[in-house]
């Protein structure tokens, strides 16, 4: 059985069907990329899978459990975490605290009122480890709002990792990063393979084809093809619908 | 976080000044000073309570005077029933406030921004009109207390200085409690939900539960202020929970510096002192006070605490 099973998922904004009877299976341990032209509904799909946006129909099953209708925070606690396309951090917190609060979420109750949380070394150590993994440990004590755009993208991934997800939904993690930052994030995603299942939306085709175990192509809210990078590259329908416009780059 | 040692020093100085005040009042033979100072302490407790949710939770309650009223009426109602112990008065005030905060908070927190402000105001006005129509307790006119609350079965609080120190001990205790809460796991989740609620959901927190808990804690603290105010005035009326009063609490917090706790205490102190002094100068003192408030907010977004911080 697949770790993530999406069946007949639908969502419309008025007359526009953004997600149109979508089916998707993601196997445990794989990195499953979802590509498609702008406006194909990729970010909406991530929002629906994560519970941030509601669905008009269909079902999302995670590890055999029905997630449909559960709010985002419940899905995160079940092991489905996401990163945001538009960086979503706590700007007034330090980078370390941004991650430490995510560690705190999965370790014990947060209805504790008297002990100073800054002195909980276990939280800080796990947070520092996550920052180190994405390559911004040296920024731990900087205000998150003061980090560069690329560093915020790295922080975004560190926060998602700190929730210890079994399934990571990554919404364009490389958007706006420099070459060096992107390399680091690609390396992190590669190192997670086999350990953490990943659903990746990304416009950087080099990264997608280098990383993905399987790729699904989303066009007008429907998956038109799923396969290995080689299969997708050779699929005539995909070339026509999507890669045709940038086959040179993608191939 | 680097501000903490600075704030600890400022708090030590401020509380030491409060502790020494009765000595100064004694030396000046100014018994009115203690009366004013006791009111200041009570309002400082209420402002502290409000800052906990306004400054740290980002929840602008425009109905916090309701909790002053609940605390004050707890004293009036128990007194008439023959229960005079301060501890029981505080307990009743806190329980009453907790119930009111739980119910109104659970509804108010389904809204955000201006709607939250308006709905907390509406609930406070409902409480206000409830007590206005409570003719058994004087309705609009309120009711004079036969005596102040008792401590250990004795009328110790009839002495103004004893009442003052009781209020000071309560303020200090609640200040330390509030500081601890803001530094705790709970405080971090509350602050995180103010910073970015979507992010907090995306790491597995439902902000509502934490915000509601903070709202209830804040309401209970403000009710303690109501108990002290009733004792100070030996009189209770619906005016305690008038919406003007709610506005004054917001002004005190903004004046002192939002999200600082000590700023709320300082804000209440200076706002009430200014009110006393300016009222001596002119009947139109609110114009002068308004000017001061505008200047403080214009020149320091963090209120009085902001001036202090920049210098340090």
Image (tube, grey):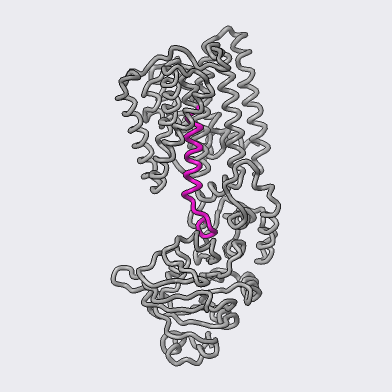
**Considering only vertical position in the picture, is B241 above or below A73?**
above
Q: Please tell me which residue lies in front, A239 or A105.
A: A105
Q: Quadrant of the N terminus of chain B?
A: top right
Image location of residue A146, percent across then percent down: 59, 55
Q: Please tell me which residue lies in front, B99 or B197.
A: B99
**Considering only vertical position in the picture, is B201 above or below B234?**
below
Q: Main secondary structure of the magenta part?
A: helix
| Residue ID at (38%, 44%) | B107
Residue A179 visible at all: no
Image location of residue B202, percent across then percent down: 51, 60
| Residue ID at (47%, 35%) | B219
Q: Quadrant of the C terminus of chain B?
A: top right
**Extreme top residue here?**
B29
Q: Please tell me which residue lies in front, B15 or B285.
A: B15
- Magenta-drawn segment: B200-224
**Extreme front residue here?**
B82
| Residue ID at (51%, 57%) | B199
Was residue A196 drawn as part of the magenta stretch in this picture? Answer: no
Q: Please tell me which residue lies in front, B238 or B191.
A: B238
**Considering only vertical position in the picture, is B26 above or below B206?**
above
**Considering only vertical position in the picture, is B184 above or below B41?**
below
Image location of residue B23, percent across then percent down: 63, 13
Image location of residue B244, percent across then percent down: 38, 28
Residue A223 visible at all: yes
Instruction: State left or right for residue A137 relative to residue B89.
Output: right
| Residue ID at (60%, 82%) | A210
């Amino acid at each position: 059985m697949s770790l993530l099973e999406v069946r007949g998922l639908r969502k419309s904004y008025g007359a526009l069907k953004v997600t149109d009877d979508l089916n998707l299976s993601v196997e445990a341990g794989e990195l499953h990329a979802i590509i498609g032209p702008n406006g194909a509904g990729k970010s909406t799909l991530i929002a629906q899978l994560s519970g941030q946006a509601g669905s008009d129909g269909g079902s999302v099953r995670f590890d055999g459990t029905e997630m449909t209708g559960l709010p985002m925070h419940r899905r995160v606690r079940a092991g489905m975490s996401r990163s945001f396309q538009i960086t979503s951090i706590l700007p007034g917190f330090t980078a370390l605290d941004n991650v430490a609060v995510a560690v705190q979420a999965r370790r014990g109750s947060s209805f504790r009122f008297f002990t100073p949380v800054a002195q909980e070394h276990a939280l800080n150590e796990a947070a520092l480890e996550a920052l180190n993994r994405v390559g911004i440990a040296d920024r731990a004590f900087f205000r998150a709002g003061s980090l560069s755009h690329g560093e915020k993208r790295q922080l975004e991934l560190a926060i998602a990792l700190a929730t210890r997800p079994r399934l990571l939904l990554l919404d364009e993690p490389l958007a706006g990063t420099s070459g060096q930052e992107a390399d680091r994030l690609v390396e992190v995603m590669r190192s997670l393979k086999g350990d953490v299942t990943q659903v990746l939306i990304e416009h950087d085709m080099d990264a997608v084809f280098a990383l993905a175990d399987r790729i699904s192509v989303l066009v007008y809210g429907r998956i038109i093809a799923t396969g290995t990078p080689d299969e997708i590259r050779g699929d005539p329908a995909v070339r026509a619908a999507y890669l045709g416009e940038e086959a040179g780059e993608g191939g | 976080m680097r501000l903490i040692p600075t704030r600890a020093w400022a708090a030590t100085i401020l509380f030491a000044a409060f502790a020494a005040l009765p000595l100064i009042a004694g030396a000046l033979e100014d018994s009115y000073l203690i009366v004013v100072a006791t009111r200041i302490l009570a309002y400082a407790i209420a402002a502290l309570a409000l800052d906990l949710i306004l400054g740290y939770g980002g929840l602008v309650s425009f109905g916090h005077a309701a909790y002053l009223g609940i605390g004050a009426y707890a004293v009036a109602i128990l007194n008439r029933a023959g229960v005079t112990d301060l501890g029981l008065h505080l307990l009743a005030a806190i329980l009453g406030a907790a119930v009111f905060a739980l119910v109104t908070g659970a509804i108010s927190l389904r809204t955000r921004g201006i709607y939250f402000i308006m709905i907390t105001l509406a609930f406070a006005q409902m409480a206000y009109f409830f007590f206005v129509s409570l003719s058994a307790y004087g309705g609009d006119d309120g009711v004079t207390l036969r005596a102040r609350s008792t401590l250990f079965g004795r009328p110790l609080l009839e002495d103004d200085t004893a009442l003052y120190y009781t209020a000071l001990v309560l303020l200090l205790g609640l200040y330390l409690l509030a500081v601890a809460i803001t530094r705790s796991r709970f405080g971090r989740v509350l602050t995180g939900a103010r910073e970015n609620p979507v992010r907090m959901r995306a790491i597995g927190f439902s902000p509502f539960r934490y915000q509601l808990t903070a709202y209830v804690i804040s309401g209970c603290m403000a009710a303690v202020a109501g108990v002290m105010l009733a004792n100070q005035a030996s009189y209770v009326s619906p005016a305690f929970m008038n919406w003007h009063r709610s506005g004054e609490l917001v002004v005190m917090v903004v004046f002192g510096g939002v999200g600082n706790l000590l700023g709320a205490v300082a804000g209440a102190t200076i706002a009430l002192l200014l009110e006393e002094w300016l009222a001596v100068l002119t009947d139109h003192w609110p114009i002068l006070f308004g000017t001061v408030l505008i200047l403080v907010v214009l020149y320091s977004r963090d209120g009085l605490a902001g001036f202090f911080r920049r210098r340090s």
